[in-house]
Image (cartoon, helix red, strand yellow):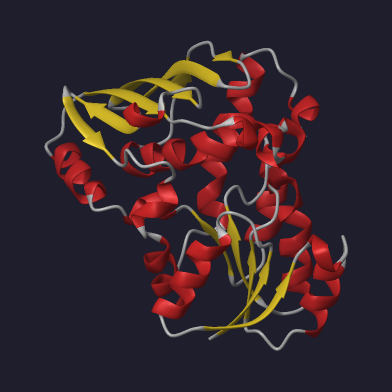
Amino acid sequence: MKFALIGTGFIMPRHAEAIYAVGGKIVDVANTAHGEDAWRKMVRETAADCVVILAPNNLHFPMAMAALDAEKIVLCEKPLSFRVEELRTLAARPNIFTVLQLKYHPLVAKLAGEISRGGEHRIEMDISVYRDKKYYESWKGKKELSGGILFNLGIHYFDLLIHLFGEPTTAGPVSYDPKTASGSFEGNNYSCAWRLSTDELQDSQRRVFRVNGADYNFSSKDNLSYENLHREVYRDLLRGKGVTPAEAIPATALINDMYKSAGIEFDSIV
């Protein structure tokens, strides 16, 4: 399969490594050095089979629509969109997938085994990572571009929790600031107290689901991308599989509700 990439930031080398690992070929790349709208021309003219979107989060939806209109397969980094209605628009189109690589983590099977035993599950979700000044000064630190830490960081973990345990039925109040957030919610067979932070010390980072007292730490590295799970994303893509826009809706809706609970109107985020 031939690929065209939009964006050459931090995550691009991980995608390039995964593409080469599955036997793919990168035939085009566009970034802002070529002009703000260079990606539009590339999408129209590229011979690639698949367009991979690695741009700031607020651009994902228009870029995905343009690539679909050009009859390309689309693989887009998370979040595919900030808005549920845009995800529904994308869900009506074929051949579009988003990158939520945590679903391929080996610990997911162990967690599924815990769930299969039945009963109530008490979950503590502690996602505490280090992000430096450069991160906060980039687009990732600007909520209108990234969607804030609930979208830029939390969506991986809310999506996985919903995937494993089901959608929440009730939710408690949410505390939020640009570097930390916390709250709670409940589902049919679980309760979850969660905390996100980008203000952790570098040597004590963790991405932990504590389920009935047992810890499942998905990574203590600087970034989840270092777990090499992108290779599994691309292996699925070659099979015509992946996380669809419809599957991304529950976590996106939950995050929207969380912002409202924190007293933040979503239009002020994006």
Splitting the image into 4 quarters, where does residue 22 fall?
bottom left
Which quarter of the figure is the C terminus placed in?
Answer: top right
Instruction: Name the side, left or right, on which 267 lies relative to 180.
Output: right
Query: Residue drawn 39% across and 77% down?
Result: 21
Residue at the extreme left of the image, as rendered: 117
Q: Is residue 95 above or below residue 220?
A: below
Query: Residue drawn 46% across and 71% down?
Result: 17
Q: Position of residue 60 (x, y in %)?
A: 71, 54
Query: Residue drawn 26% across and 48% down?
Result: 108
Splitting the image into 4 quarters, where does residue 45 fall?
bottom right
Nearest the viewer among 116 and 269 is 269
Q: Is residue 224 above or below residue 253?
A: below
Q: Position of residue 57 (x, y in %)?
A: 68, 47
Instruction: Name the side, left or right, on which 257 lies relative to 251.
Output: right
Splitting the image into 4 quarters, where does residue 163 fall?
top left
Q: Position of residue 155 (x, y in %)?
A: 51, 39
- Residue 240 in view: no
Nearest the viewer among 23 and 171 is 23
